[in-house]
């Protein structure tokens, strides 16, 4: 994998949360995975008991990832392996996400999110 | 077939991103393989009216709601 040199003049990242990665440089392999359950209840959610991943089959289901095809014979020639970044402004990087300036060889990411809405009885 | 790529340098002027979330990637640079998979479902047990919290697994044969 050809390495690159990153010249960053100014970058502003407001928040990085929940095992996310912000990286200036080269990465060989990255496999971020995030699950999440988002509960919205009328009157507010007191605690997160009663909502665990085992209850819903979306989290147990097999991930059908794409087959890795090394069939394409390719050659990358870097005449000038520099990256010049003038200004980047990122407000939020969350839920095991990845912001990178540089080369990244392999990335295999998976995310499963389940939204649950609970409204009081009889209210329209 | 041989796929040949000639790279010179990469200049980025100005980028504004509000959010990168849920195992996503924002990359400035090279890459060989990216595999992103995401799951999304809205079955009946995603919308509950009343204080019944939450139902058990939908595929249980007897379908009782107490654990």
Image: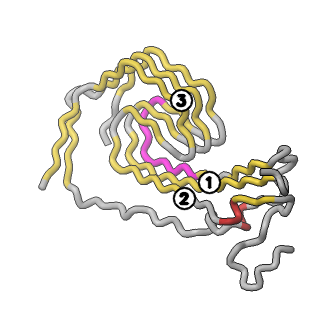
Same subunit: marks 1 and 3: no
Tell me the subunit letter for badge 2.
B
Q: Is mark 2 on a helix, strand or loop?
A: strand
Q: In this view, does A67 lie to the left or right of A75?
A: right
Pointer 2 and pointer 1: residues touching (CB < 8 Å)?
yes
Tell me the subunit letter for badge 1.
A
Q: Give the range drawn in magenta.
A: A24-33
Residue A113: give its label: 1
Q: As drawn, which residue projects farthest toward the left?
A: B1
- Chain-order first, disc 3 or disc 2: 3
Q: In this view, does A74 lie above or below A71?
A: above
Residue A59: give its label: none
Q: As drawn, which residue projects farthest toward the bottom?
A: B61
Measured Cα–Cα span from mark 3 to mark 2:
22 Å
Q: Residue at image x 20%, y 37%? A: A77
Residue B67 in view: no
Image quadrant holding the N terminus of chain A, namely top left
Residue designated by label 2: B39
Residue designated by label 3: B18
Q: What element carries label 3?
A: strand
**Helix, strand or loop: magenta stretch:** strand
Question: Is A50 a magenta residue?
Answer: no
Q: How crowded is mark 2: few (under 14 residues within 10 Å), some or many (20 or more)?
A: some
Q: Is residue B67 above or below residue A13?
A: below
Image x and y of residue B24, in percent: 50, 44
Q: Which colour scheme is used?
A: secondary structure
Q: Is residue A102 left or right of residue B60?
A: left
Residue B18 in view: yes
Same subunit: marks 2 and 1: no
Q: Residue at image x 48%, y 56%? A: B37
Front residue of A123/A79: it is A123
């Amino acid at each position: 994998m050809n390495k690159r040199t990153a010249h960053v003049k100014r970058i502003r990242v407001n928040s990085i949360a929940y095992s996310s990665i912000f990286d200036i440089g080269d990465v060989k392999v990255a496999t971020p995975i995030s699950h999440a359950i988002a509960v919205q209840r009328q009157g507010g959610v007191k605690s997160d008991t009663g909502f665990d991943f085992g209850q819903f089959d979306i989290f147990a289901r097999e991930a059908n990832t794409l087959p890795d095809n090394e069939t394409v014979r390719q050659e990358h020639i870097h005449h000038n392996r520099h990256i010049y970044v003038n200004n980047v402004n990122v407000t939020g990087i969350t839920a095991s996400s990845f912001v990178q300036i540089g080369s990244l060889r392999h990335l295999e990411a998976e995310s499963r999110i389940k939204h649950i809405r609970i409204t009081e009885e009889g209210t329209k | 077939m041989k796929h040949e790529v000639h790279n010179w340098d990469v200049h980025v002027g100005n980028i504004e991103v509000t959010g990168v979330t849920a195992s996503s990637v924002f990359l400035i640079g090279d890459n060989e393989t990216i595999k992103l998979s995401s799951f999304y479902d809205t079955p009946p047990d995603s919308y509950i009216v009343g204080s019944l919290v939450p139902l058990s697994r939908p595929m249980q044969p007897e379908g009782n709601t107490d654990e």
